[in-house]
Amino acid sequence: MENKIKQIIGASIQVKQQIQQDETLLTTIGLCVDAIVAAFEKGNKVLFCGNGGSAADAQHLAAEFSGRFYKDRKALPAEALHCNTSYITAVANDYSYDVIYSRMVDGIGNDGDVIVGLSTSGNSKNIIKAFETAKEKNMITIGFTGTTGGGMKAVSNYLINIPSTDTPRIQESHIMIGHIICELVEAQLF
């Protein structure tokens, strides 16, 4: 049992070491920080979306902005799009689960806003449709995916594609990079 635990921890560390050595990915993370800082400075908001565990991660990261990270500071306009269960269930029932996020983006997204979509496969239809709608509205799209980027690769202004195909390792890295972005955005703004 102990060896298996060490093996899982080692696999997580290995993915993070690959990220640490990937200059392209590190540059992309920095560009995401710059884009989010610029959006907040202009009075825009950051929206987050995901499914399952990635929805929980999206909500977590939105809370880091709207609540606080390290500093006691004013709230930043950020929210996860799945938190209104009446809306989600109505739209999924009346239209399709594939449009739950795109309809919300169409309703509240504005030119200059940022949308962050988390999908380990990069193939979540509802996030791809949300990004397509966001692009029509001149929003910035940031995709958090696994190694290939999936279908989100084509609709992401910035793609943070974790070098793994293992869902838990990808999600662990999404949270790590999300925390890095939150920390650096907060430091630049405050």
Image (spheres, helix red, strand yellow):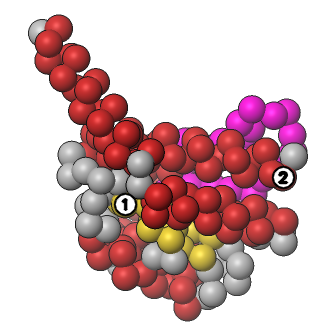
Checking the image for residue 189, the label placed there is 2
Q: Nearer the viewer, residue 154 or 86?
A: 154
Query: Is residue 178 visible in this depiction of the protein?
Result: yes
- Left or right of 17 in this view: 111: right
Asked if residue 133 is positioned above or below residue 167 in the image, the reply reads: below
Within 10 Å of disc 2 (Cα), the crowding (few <14, some 14-19, many 20+) is few
Within 10 Å of disc 1 (Cα), the crowding (few <14, some 14-19, many 20+) is many
Placement of the N terminus among the 4 image quadrants: top left
User: In whole angstroms, how far apart are the C-alphas of marks 2 and 1?
Assistant: 26 Å
Q: Secondary structure at mark 2?
A: helix
Q: Nearer the viewer, residue 89 or 52?
A: 52
Q: Position of residue 171 (x, y in %)?
A: 36, 44
Magenta stretch: dominant secondary structure? loop
Residue at 36% from the left image edge and 73% from the top image edge? 152
Query: Of the residues shown, which amino acid type is indicated by label 1?
Result: Asn
Q: Quadrant of residue 107?
A: bottom right
Q: Position of residue 175 (x, y in %)?
A: 47, 42
Checking the image for residue 115, the label placed there is none
Query: Is residue 49 visible in this depiction of the protein?
Result: no
**Is residue 25 within the magenta segment?**
no
- Left or right of 114 in this view: 155: left
Residue at 47% from the left image edge and 58% from the top image edge? 23
Query: Of the residues shown, which amino acid type is indicated by label 2?
Result: Leu
Q: Position of residue 112 (x, y in %)?
A: 71, 79
Work out which residue is located at the far top of the displayed protein and give it: 2
**Is residue 61 within the magenta segment?**
yes
- Left or right of 37 in this view: 10: left
Q: Position of residue 181 (x, y in %)?
A: 62, 50
The magenta segment: 60-84
Asked if residue 58 is positioned above or below residue 176 in the image, the reply reads: below
Checking the image for residue 161, the label placed there is 1
Q: Secondary structure at mark 1?
A: strand
